[in-house]
Amino acid sequence: MMRQTKISICLPTCNRPELLMESLASCLAQTHTNIEIVIGDDSSDTRTRNLIDTTYLHETRISYVKNEPPLGQADNVASLFKRATGDKILLIHDDDALKTDCIERLLSAWNLHPDLDIAFGDQYQMDNAGRVDIEGSCQLNSAYYRTEAAAGLQPNPGRTGLIQMMPNNGWLANADLVKKIGYKKQYGIGCDFVFGAQICLAARKVYYLKEYVSFCRKTDVSITLTSARSTTAAAVLAYDFLKSLKLDSSLESARELALKRIVPIVVSVYARNHQPMQGLSIALAHLYAYNYGLSKRLYFHLMLILKGFAGGGSYKSSTQNG
């Protein structure tokens, strides 16, 4: 039955034509062949369009659009969801890739649970050249609670999104739910985290497959790396979202677990951006994120905060990098 299921692979891209071609090749190589690949190109030049035209001019499974003017990350992804015509949607970013049996393996979860909403698996971590780091991959999945003990149907779907157990791409979900949640540009580059949390909170059933199904790439040009020290960083936006989120009491422990990961990053960002009072306030409000003073990271961040006070920088622009 799952063989007849049409899958829309949504692939946003921006100024990375060579990496896109690698990602696109992994999509076209899927063992589940009933697919469409919906590409939204935010590039500032025509290199990507030229590559698509010369390489895949007659590939009917590809639906390519050059966004003019560029839409931005959130609106680009949102436009892909709207264009998708499949029963289920899979999102993959242009610097990442899928294992050839990714869709087939994720679809197998619906054979077990026909009323499933979302399925995801493990990710390989690879470098800019595409070399897989096995040890790093194990650490990555473990850090995001993807362990053998957690495999299968998730007892609390919302928790899965809040603690970022579901990766920001490489997942498979029912198209109607994906389109209902959508990507929201008011959260900036934190839109990946917000979408993951919101779709899992809205899902009836979420399944974690303890198998590698996709590849994520650590590159020198990734959005995360280039904005990590800005007060518009994904972690800062995710923190604001988590603090404002109204949750059932059963999910408060998941919120705390998510904040334990995010808070030290946010404190560091504010300290480095000459807003020491903001950083100190957040650190003191979430001491559990520093194991109540047992973490050396707390004292390093306090040192950064003190330097900020000494420099009198608490009134400077929040967009300035430290």
Image: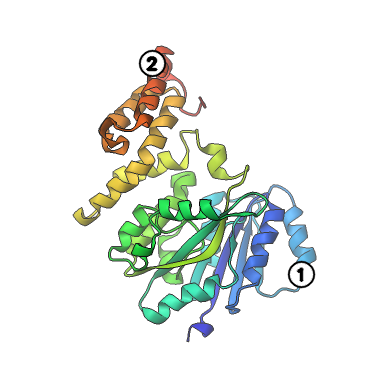
Q: Number of callouts in the render?
A: 2
Let me know if residue 20 appears in the view. yes
Q: Secondary structure at mark 1?
A: loop
Q: Secondary structure at mark 2?
A: helix
Q: Amino acid at mark 2?
A: Phe
Q: Residue at x 27, y 34 (%)?
A: 287
Q: Residue at x 45, y 78 (%)?
A: 108
Image location of residue 201, percent across then percent down = 32, 60
Q: Residue furthest left?
A: 249
Q: Residue furthest front?
A: 135
Q: Nearer the viewer, residue 111 or 72?
A: 111
Q: Which residue is mark 2?
A: 309
Q: Residue at x 40, y 12 (%)?
A: 310
Q: Earlier in the sequence, mark 1 or mark 2?
A: 1
Q: Nearer the viewer, residue 48 or 104?
A: 104
**Apparent side of residue 158 relative to residue 131 in the rendered image (left or right):** left
Q: Which residue is mark 1?
A: 57
Is there CB contact under 8 Å for labels 1 and 2? no
User: Which image quadrant is residue 83 in?
Assistant: bottom right
Q: Given this view, does label 1 or label 2 mark the residue nearer the observer?
A: 2
Q: Amino acid at mark 1?
A: Leu
Is 228 located above or below residue 6 in the figure? above
Q: Residue at x 57, y 57 (%)?
A: 93
Is 63 located above or below residue 112 in the figure? above
Q: Residue furthest right?
A: 54
User: Which image quadrant is residue 57 in?
Assistant: bottom right
Image location of residue 232, percent across then percent down = 47, 37
Find the distance from the CA under tag 1 to the CA under tag 2. 59 Å
Image location of residue 127, percent across then percent down = 62, 50
Image location of residue 202, percent across then percent down = 33, 63
Colour scheme of the picture: rainbow
